[in-house]
Amino acid sequence: MNLPPVEATAAAAITRSFHAISGEVLELLYQHRVLSTQQLHVLLTPPEKRPARPVYLRRQLGELHRAGLVERIRAKGPGGRGRLQSQPFLWFLTEAGAESVEEAGELPPRPYRVTPEAVAGARQAHTLGVNEVGIAFVEWARRLGHECGPLDWTPEVANRIRDGQRRFEDDHVISDAVLNYVHVERGGRRTMLSFFVEFDRATMTSARLAAKLEAYGRLYEYVPQSADRARRTSNATRPAWMYNYPVFPRVLVVLDAAPPKAGEPDRRAQRLAARTEDLYARAGADVRLSRLKGDINIGVTTLQQLQEHGPLAPIFTPLLRGTPTARPAPTDLYLASK
């Protein structure tokens, strides 16, 4: 049946919109590996155009699922198997979906492939939490007129911190994400900010988290050494991070904790405050970080504060300033460099 010209034009516009947003969905899942339906909805839809329920997005996800480009599983949640159907879907690319993104050539290729077993594994909540950190930056950039888009953070970025051939985890610091943000002032002045993001759900000891922060000190000072000293160039004294970043990114630690079980008091705020105290003490006691306190910025906040107040609010406790008896007040990460 042939449609009237006006209806045909409208149908063509809907088709174009469908394909455009489907392409964005594939790109987001390729870069961020796993996203919930709601996370996709927030990233793809500005607040003023956001309906109460992402019906249109769900229809597109269904089409991509039937086409064999995306897969889904139910998220883990409290209540056991009996409540599984009440949990949201988590979406990730199939092999065909990943290949379609790589063929388009719009994103840097990444070697990993996501499997249902990996999505359902122990790091599911951590992966979704890192997404929430990135989404908070995107949401606040939209509100403040700054620039930080859905593709402006990259999860699990590894940087070498020493020469040799040990375990990969011993030779590299693996950031939960590297995030870029452009602060735009009223006069149009632009300040480009970058962050090494560490998301902590209070599931590891504070000592292990502090060791991760100490590794950023190693990264700042690490200069690759050529095995052939006769061929060593003047760049041999240049730290490795300078090849990837114009300035050393700020280190952002975002704390979160699982909600209490039914009937238990909510002590999350006290737990995260104590964790911040522990990190401050451990970072201040580290000789390397203390020596680099004028070169490295490390700030700690909670996911709740970041979501409610934004990255330009005084919500970050600086770890390498002040003394244990005169700790500085929380600040924002933009002013922390001044």
Image (cartoon, rainbow, N blue to C red):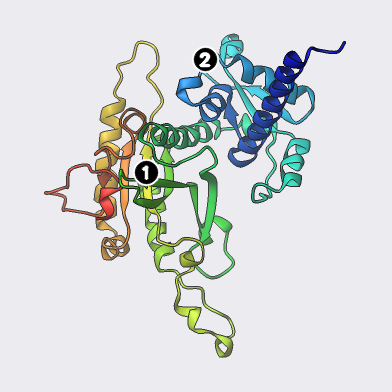
- Quarter residue 34 falls in: top right
**For discs 1 and 2, the disc positioned in front in the rendered view:** 2
- Quarter residue 101 falls in: top right
- Residue 281, labelled with which disc? none
Q: Label 1, on which residue?
A: 253
> Residue shown at 30%/33% (left/top)?
272
Q: Label 2, on which residue?
A: 51
Residue 270: x and y, percent? 25, 29
Q: Residue furthest front?
A: 5
The quarter of the image holding the N terminus is top right
Report the amino acid beneath label 2.
Answer: Pro
Report the amino acid beneath label 1.
Answer: Val
Q: Is residue 274 above or below residue 8?
A: below
Res. 319 in view: no
Q: Is residue 220 above or below residue 129?
A: below
Please name whichever residue, 285 or 234, is drawn nearer the observer in this view of the structure: 234
> Residue shown at 63%/17% (left/top)?
56
Q: Earlier in the sequence, mark 1 or mark 2?
A: 2
The quarter of the image holding the C terminus is bottom left
- Taking the image as shown, residue 48 lies to the left or right of residue 336, namely right
Q: Is residue 311 above or below residue 266?
A: below
Please name whichever residue, 164 or 317, is drawn nearer the observer in this view of the structure: 317
Q: Secondary structure at mark 1?
A: strand
Please name whichever residue, 100 or 300, is drawn nearer the observer in this view of the structure: 100
- Taking the image as shown, residue 260 lies to the left or right of residue 70, namely left
